[in-house]
């Protein structure tokens, strides 16, 4: 059936972002594909990146891991939330590795996994997931594949970056593992001393710009396209949309477009977002509704019902304009998009 909303996703851009991150880091890159690969579609992302040479994929839960069992290369998945009290049945029949986060999880894995290898997360200063550096004794007897830590402020020039690096070096020298890994997308741009043996980008794979250094190296992966539902003229002196926030001081040509905040085109784009057709910029007039926006098409009066408009979603600028983070913009992209990988 015809789907009136499209998310055009470029395999070429995705693979080229992955290669560019590997080159920057000087070591292999895992791909964070949690949250349906930040909204773009985890199965397609895993297939595309596996073909490009990616051998490690990170999800949050065993449920996400199960959804990728048929597409991910054997043994390539790690589950970031580790092994909770309800996860044993799924973990026992899976070839994914848990990333153990707590003393309890370490004990649970030691008791039930029969020597199977695991990953471990050490908290070096974020105080989110992970064992504290003073809890390393609890790792005795585990076969650790990758030892991880995670940076809290890599997208800023923050004193915590150097502190976490020092703490992770200390932990790495005390704990035996096959590989060590610290950097997310932003961390990759802090310098190769953050690379260790494996980096773990998410955002930058999908076209996000985590730090200024990434500009020019990372390209947009997803393009939003929506259709014109109706054309109208907003008469001089009238308003449009909820709250009547756009006021026409002259007759204004408008196109009503089938995308709204239910699709992840947030209300923060009201009066500041834009679309584009035939190379012409079409500014958003007034408020974003649930399923609709109004675009000015004074500059393109020929724009007709049924025509496709691309919605400006260049992540760095869109985040600034809407007040949302690039992460929220990607993961918010809704279920009504036909995700087309090309
Ligand atoms: C999500 C996540 C990543 C990827 O982070 P980005 O900022 O999107 O690159 C890396 N490591 C861990 C532990 C994560 O949870």
Image: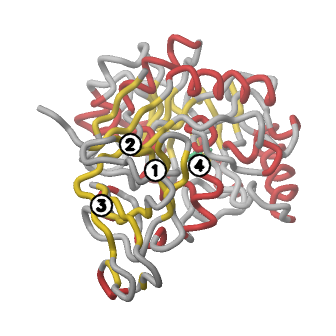
Q: Residue at 31% x, 78% y: name it.
A: 241
Q: Is residue 135 rendered to the left or right of residue 249? A: right
Q: Which residue is mark 1?
A: 311
Q: Nearer the viewer, residue 12 or 120?
A: 12
Rounded to the nearest whole Å, what is the CA distance between mark 1 and mark 3?
A: 13 Å
Q: Is residue 340 rendered to the left or right of residue 279? A: left
Q: Secondary structure at mark 1?
A: strand
Q: Which residue is mark 3?
A: 256
Q: Nearer the viewer, residue 310 or 267?
A: 310
Q: Tell me: is circle 4 under 8 Å from ligand 1.
A: no
The spot of residue 228 in percent (x, y) is 29, 50
Rounded to the nearest whole Å, what is the CA distance between mark 4 and mark 2?
A: 13 Å
Q: Nearer the viewer, mark 1 or mark 3?
A: 3
Q: Secondary structure at mark 2?
A: strand
Graded by Cα atoms within 10 Å as few (under 14), some (14 to 19) or many (20 or more), the crowding at tag 2 reads: many
Q: Secondary structure at mark 3?
A: strand
Q: Which residue is mark 4?
A: 314
Rounded to the nearest whole Å, what is the CA distance between mark 3 and mark 2?
A: 13 Å
Q: Nearer the viewer, residue 70 or 278?
A: 278
Using the image, determine if residue 81 lies above or below residue 264.
Answer: above
Q: Secondary structure at mark 4?
A: loop
The spot of residue 222 in percent (x, y) is 49, 38
Sooner in the amino-acid sequence: mark 1 or mark 3: 3
Q: Nearer the viewer, mark 4 or mark 1?
A: 1
Rounded to the nearest whole Å, what is the CA distance between mark 4 and mark 1?
A: 9 Å
Q: Is residue 270 visible?
A: yes
State the image quarter where residue 62 is shown: top left
Graded by Cα atoms within 10 Å as few (under 14), some (14 to 19) or many (20 or more), the crowding at tag 1 reads: many
């Amino acid at each position: 059936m015809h789907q009136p909303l499209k998310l055009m996703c470029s395999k070429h851009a995705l693979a080229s972002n992955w290669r560019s991150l590997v080159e920057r880091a000087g070591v292999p890159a895992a791909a964070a594909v949690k949250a349906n690969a930040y909204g773009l579609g985890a199965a397609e992302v895993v297939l595309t990146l596996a073909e490009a040479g990616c051998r490690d994929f990170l999800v949050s839960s065993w449920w996400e891991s199960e959804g990728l069992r048929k597409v991910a290369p054997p043994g390539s998945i790690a589950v970031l939330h580790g092994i909770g009290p309800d996860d044993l049945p799924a973990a026992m029949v899976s070839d994914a590795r848990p990333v153990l986060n707590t003393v309890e999880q370490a004990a649970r894995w030691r008791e039930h996994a029969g020597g199977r290898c695991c990953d471990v997360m050490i908290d070096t200063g974020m105080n989110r997931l992970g064992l504290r550096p003073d809890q390393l004794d609890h790792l005795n007897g585990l076969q650790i594949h990758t030892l991880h830590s995670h940076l809290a402020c890599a997208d800023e020039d923050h004193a915590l970056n150097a502190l976490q690096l020092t703490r992770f070096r200390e932990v790495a020298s005390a704990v035996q593992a096959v590989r060590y890994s610290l950097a997310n997308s932003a961390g990759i741009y802090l310098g190769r001393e953050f690379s260790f043996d494996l980096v773990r980008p998410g955002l930058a794979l999908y076209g996000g710009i985590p730090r200024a250094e990434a500009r020019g190296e990372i390209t947009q992966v997803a393009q939003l396209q929506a259709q014109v539902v109706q054309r109208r003229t907003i008469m001089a002196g009238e308003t449009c949309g909820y709250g009547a926030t756009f006021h026409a001081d002259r007759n204004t040509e408008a196109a009503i477009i089938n995308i709204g905040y239910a699709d992840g085109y947030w209300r923060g784009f009201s009066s500041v977002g834009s679309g584009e057709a035939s190379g012409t910029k079409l500014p958003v007039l007034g408020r974003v509704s649930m399923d609709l926006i109004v675009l000015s098409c004074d500059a393109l009066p020929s724009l007709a019902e049924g025509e496709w408009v691309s919605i400006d979603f260049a992540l760095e600028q869109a985040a600034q304009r809407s007040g949302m983070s690039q992460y929220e913009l990607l993961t918010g992209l809704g279920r009504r998009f036909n995700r087309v990988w090309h």
